[in-house]
């Protein structure tokens, strides 16, 4: 019952279970009958709707569940005790999970996100209780520092060090902010965590507030996430009702409460100073640093800003210990990282793996490899600010340092798999379109520079590239990175630089030969039917939405170039492919 599951029909499936169970005379609702009840994202979004049925302690998971399937599951499985084998998940479901190490996601998909009692049942708020009753702020910060937790929002700065600096900054008022303004294309990590386990984020904020001396907190979350916002509001109300928020929490002397601030969907507000400006009621635009927010943040007061995943790690670290968390990952990149695995891969979804896991294992062992027998071309990490890692570097470890060496970043956790049907010039153009549109316009290098980059890339994909364009792209990218005011502009050229670095031949093919090797850029493609290979079957004619294909049955057909929209549907159904 996360956004993905509900979009696939989760609500209708739950209603069908309640109805069928009632009609069968079983005196239990879904939420009482099933040990897992309503849950958030299960991870393998590609197989939604996922349903667990637990009978006699044995769990059976069904995939692609539709309301029409529920009656049979109830009659055969719940009543007769015979699972419906045809609809059960296969080995790929278990292989998707086998190599994952779940910390932040350990309770997502298992607990009811709308009930605080469900969070209590898995040890929820025990970490906050431990901190408030037996640890000093300094001891708490030392645990976080020792764990090696680094910010999961992209920068990778030491969380414990950030807290310590803010703790040591003298002020009568301090703030802690949860940055839930996740806006990367193809990224849904933070959104899913809040939808599946909002109390973990709240508990992390309580511990952070106690550690730095804050009395007020904000969750900055975009309004486009209605389910996450709804569940967060419910969780905050429940936490207040149990005295986990408000005055004198657990009689510890801590006064702390959290407000929700809805963002309007500006990508730049993911940058901490732009986010602060937005909360203050100003236009979301970044400012120069220093001073950093830990010294002068919200309304000029010391402020700690952590993203959702960072804060959700905190309760588990306090409960299980710094050494436990540090046992995962690498020497410099401790713990685990949540990624949204998307693109041309069989198993798309939400994953959590130890820092340092080889990219190859993520793509092939967890993701199941590319679709339809196509060959892997690259993996884009770090969202629109990241870089494209070519298939020849697929053995690289996924951590802060390793990705930086090859021109990419961990970022907030976007991971897009690309295959041989993707044009790397067009991919760079796609991400530049996003960052250029999302630029706040405050500084010239970003406002004008990204526009110039996009113009050059657009010209190249239209077959109008010129000699020297590649070098111009490189020079301009380095200038933008060096002189932009905030992280948006400083990282916007990464897709351009990484694709030139590893796929320069594709840029040259576009410029020198007016050819798109992947046959993606429409201005460089012309569709025609080779008479010697056309049997007049009509398959291409039936899928042509623009009615550009004409011809008689069992006779060679033809395509009207002036009508063809170059969608490629005809090529997809062509059974006589020779290249």
Image (cartoon, rainbow, N blue to C red):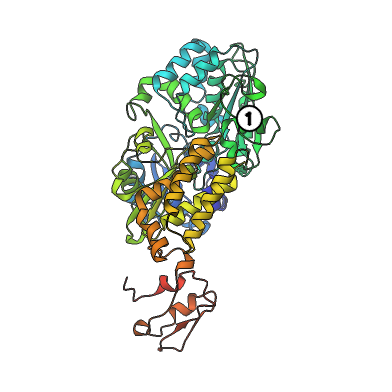
Residue 15 in the image, given as x and y percentages of width and height: 57, 50
Q: Is residue 84 left or right of residue 215?
A: left
User: In which quadrant of the rendered view does residue 376 lie?
Assistant: bottom left
Residue 492 in the image, given as x and y percentages of width and height: 50, 43
Q: SS of the residue at dot 1?
A: helix
User: To which residue does mark 1 refer?
Assistant: 276
Relative height, residue 217 to residue 22 (above, below): above
Crowding around mark 1 (Cα neighbors within 10 Å: few <14, some 14 to 19, many 20+) is many
Q: Is residue 401 left or right of residue 171?
A: left
Q: Is residue 507 left or right of residue 241?
A: left
Q: Is residue 20 something one can see in this rendering?
A: no
Residue 416 in the image, given as x and y percentages of width and height: 42, 49
* Count of numbered tags: 1
The one of 326 and 95 positioned closer to us in this rendering: 326
Relative height, residue 415 to residue 246 (above, below): below
Relative height, residue 301 to residue 399 (above, below): above
The one of 15 and 437 positioned closer to us in this rendering: 437
The one of 543 and 513 positioned closer to us in this rendering: 513
The one of 369 and 88 positioned closer to us in this rendering: 369
At a point 45% along the width and 83% down the height, the residue shown is 558
Q: Residue furthest right?
A: 281
Q: Is residue 131 something one can see in this rendering?
A: yes
User: In which quadrant of the rendered view does residue 414 lie?
Assistant: top left
At a point 65% along the width and 21% down the height, the residue shown is 300
Q: Residue furthest front?
A: 468
* Quadrant where the image shows the C terminus: bottom left
Residue 187 in the image, given as x and y percentages of width and height: 49, 44
């Amino acid at each position: 019952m996360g956004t993905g599951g509900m979009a696939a029909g989760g609500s209708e499936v739950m209603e069908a279970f309640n109805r069928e169970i009632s009609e069968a005379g079983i005196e239990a609702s879904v939420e009482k009958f099933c040990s897992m009840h309503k849950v958030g994202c299960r991870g393998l979004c590609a197989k939604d709707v996922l349903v667990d049925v637990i009978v006699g302690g044995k769990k059976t998971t069904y995939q692609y569940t539709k309301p029409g399937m529920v009656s049979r599951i109830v009659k055969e499985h719940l009543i007769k005790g015979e699972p419906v084998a045809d609809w059960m998940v296969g080995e790929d479901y278990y292989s998707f999970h086998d190599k994952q190490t779940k910390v932040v996601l350990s309770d997502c998909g298992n607990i009811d996100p709308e009930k605080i009692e469900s969070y209590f049942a898995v040890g929820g708020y025990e970490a906050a209780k431990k901190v408030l009753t037996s640890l000093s702020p300094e001891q708490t910060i030392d645990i976080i520092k020792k764990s090696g937790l680094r910010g999961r929002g992209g920068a990778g700065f030491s969380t414990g060090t950030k807290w310590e600096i803010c703790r040591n900054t003298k002020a009568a008022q301090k703030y802690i902010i949860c940055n839930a303004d996740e806006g990367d294309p193809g990224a849904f990590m933070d959104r899913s965590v809040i939808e599946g386990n909002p109390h973990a984020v709240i508990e992390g904020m309580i511990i952070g507030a106690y550690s730095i001396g804050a009395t007020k907190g904000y969750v900055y979350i975009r309004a486009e996430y209605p389910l996450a916002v709804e569940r967060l509001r419910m969780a905050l109300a429940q936490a207040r009702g149990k005295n986990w928020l408000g005055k004198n929490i657990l009689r510890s002397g801590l006064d702390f409460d959290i407000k929700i601030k809805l963002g309007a969907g500006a990508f730049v507000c993911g940058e901490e100073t732009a986010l602060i400006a937005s909360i203050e009621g100003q236009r979301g635009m970044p400012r120069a640093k220093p001073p950093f927010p830990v010294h002068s943040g919200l309304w000029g007061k010391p402020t700690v800003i952590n993203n959702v995943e960072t804060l959700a790690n905190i309760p588990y670290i306090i409960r299980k210990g710094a050494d436990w968390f540090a046992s995962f990952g690498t020497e410099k990149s401790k713990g685990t990282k949540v990624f949204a695995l998307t693109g041309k891969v069989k198993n798309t979804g939400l994953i959590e793996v130890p820092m340092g896991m080889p990219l190859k294992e993520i793509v092939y062992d967890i993701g199941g490899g590319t679709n339809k027998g196509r060959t892997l071309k690259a993996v884009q990490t770090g969202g629109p600010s990241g870089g494209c890692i070519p298939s020849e570097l697929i053995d690289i470890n996924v951590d802060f340092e390793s990705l930086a060496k090859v021109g990419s970043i961990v970022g907030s956790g976007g991971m897009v798999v690309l295959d041989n049907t993707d044009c790397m010039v067009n991919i760079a153009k796609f991400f530049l379109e996003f960052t250029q549109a999302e630029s706040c316009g405050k500084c010239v290098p970003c406002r004008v520079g990204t526009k110039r980059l996009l113009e050059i890339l657009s010209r190249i994909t239209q077959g109008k590239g010129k000699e020297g364009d590649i070098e111009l792209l490189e020079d301009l990218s380095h200038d933008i990175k060096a002189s932009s005011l905030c992280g948006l502009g400083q990282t916007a050229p990464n897709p351009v630089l990484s694709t030139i670095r590893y796929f320069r031949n594709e840029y040259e093919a576009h410029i020198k030969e007016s050819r798109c090797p992947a046959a993606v850029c429409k201005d460089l493609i012309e569709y025609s039917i080779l008479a010697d290979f056309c049997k007049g079957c009509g398959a291409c004619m039936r899928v042509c939405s623009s009615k550009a294909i004409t011809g008689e049955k069992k006779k060679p057909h033809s395509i009207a170039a002036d009508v063809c929209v170059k969608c490629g549907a005809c090529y997809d159904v062509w059974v006589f492919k020779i290249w």
